[in-house]
Amino acid sequence: MKSLDRRKFLLGAGGSVMALPWLELNAAEPKTKKEKEPPLRFASFYSPMGFVRDHFFPEKDNPDFLSMPTLSPLKKVGSKVTLITGLSRVNVRGVDVHNQCSSCFLSSADPHGKLKSPYPMDRTLDHLIADQVSHRTPIRSLELNCNSFKDLKESIYLDNISWYGPEHVATAMKDPLQVYQRLFKTSNSDKDITDLILADAANFKKNLTHQDKDKLDEYFDSVREIEKQIEKLNKYYRVHKRADVTEPDEEPMTRGEYIRLMGKLLVVAFQGDLTHVATFMLAPERWGSPQLFHELNFAKSHHGLTHGQNDQSVKKFLVQVDRFYVELFAEVLEQMDAITEGEGTLLDHSMVTLGSGLGDGRDHTMNELPIIVAGSANGKLKTGGILNCPENTPLANLWLSQAQLMGTGMKQFADSTGPLNGLLV
């Protein structure tokens, strides 16, 4: 903590710590244009078992990908989103396809190399990036997972996309309260963290511009809102009975509200410069247990739906699940785009990817992966359209491009053949 700039933190009673959002004073008297530029953030969202293809990918002669039923929730931030087609991964035969889909999504390791795992695993992209940028933030990286089942049927490979190395998982946090306590450390979680640092904040604000004061107030409001939601989660199960479908113990509120709260925590972590690297699993790969999608008013096995989509009634359910996850992803992007930072927004200073390790959940294909990239990475990425890559372009080319933009100096990543052509401005 001592090595970090004091201007970025408020210290309160009881040893509480709150990181501050990026303020104009962070750019005071910069030595170079780059120093004035807000820091770049990286996040990778994972949605399991692919998407229904004819509702996700437009026809080749249709440039309006936002007209697709599954992607239409992205319209509000459509100018800052890119659909990428043609990306693929090596499908290693003879091992479970779902296990390798999630566990290898961010590693794309050489399947012909000397593996220390049954799957082509290696250190994942998020940690390779964190190796280079974690000195900038108090939290090295943030791993979030919206799987609240306690008695998991899923293997560790199905439930994690972030790995320090083969067989060395970066355990994700699944409890919003645990995430909150990690982001806003306090010795007394019963007290509002904003109350604990209020006095210090008042003194700190005297030296801020009017615009920075408004940003600080906005940030405090965001933290307070999360505190209220945490309490709301606690109250919910004190007065509500469990659904008939077997659900995980202590699952907070509805599925959508749970994911929405985890997304808000991620946004606040980026806004407060607590971390610049994050992964976010919307659900585990191959979730066999029937899941209660409260907002959609049905309980289904997502995995079962993918294999029954020849039945139009089943396909209808599956499309609703796909759109449900894209809507929640879109809300995160909208929140980021509403936060002014420097000459743009928090979203403008980020790279946020939504993808899946399967191209088609029914046929278990790993070509034509569904990939969306949001944010322009400080103006360095093209946005607002479709990037059609040649068939079977390695997914690792995208990861290499993002690693280079994050300042890793990386020349090669897994089976990449080079940076992704057409992605950069």
Image: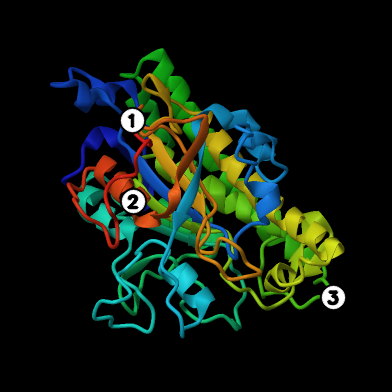
- One can see residue 184 in this view: no
Q: Amino acid at mark 2?
A: Asn
- One can see residue 75 in this view: yes
Q: Residue at x 29, y 70 (%)?
A: 110
Q: Tell me the colour scheme of the image.
A: rainbow
Of badges 2 and 3, nearer the viewer stands 2
Position in image of residue 50 (x %, y %): 60, 61
Position in image of residue 350 (x %, y %): 40, 37
Image mark count: 3
Position in image of residue 41 (x %, y %): 36, 41
- Which sits in the foreground, 423 or 192? 423
Query: Quick one: label 3, few (<14), some, or many (20+) residues within 10 Å?
Result: few
Query: Quick one: label 1, few (<14), some, or many (20+) residues within 10 Å?
Result: some
Position in image of residue 375 (x %, y %): 45, 35
Q: Which mark is residue 244?
A: 3
Q: Is residue 318 left or right of residue 371?
A: right
Q: Which comes sooner in the sequence, label 2 or label 1? A: 1
Q: Residue at x 48, y 68 (%)?
A: 102
Q: Is residue 289 above or below residue 137?
A: below
Q: Is residue 87 above or below residue 290?
A: above
Q: Is residue 190 left or right of residue 7?
A: right
Q: Secondary structure at mark 1?
A: loop
Q: Amino acid at mark 1?
A: Lys
Q: Secondary structure at mark 3?
A: loop
Q: From the image, which quarter does the C terminus lie in? A: top left
Rounded to the nearest angstrom, the CA distance separating label 1 from label 3 is 50 Å
Q: Quadrant of residue 233?
A: bottom right
Q: Report which residue position mark 1 lands on.
A: 380
Rounded to the nearest angstrom, the CA distance separating label 2 from label 1 is 16 Å
Q: Which mark is residue 397?
A: 2
Rounded to the nearest angstrom, the CA distance separating label 2 from label 3 is 46 Å
Residue placed farthest to the left in the image?
A: 31
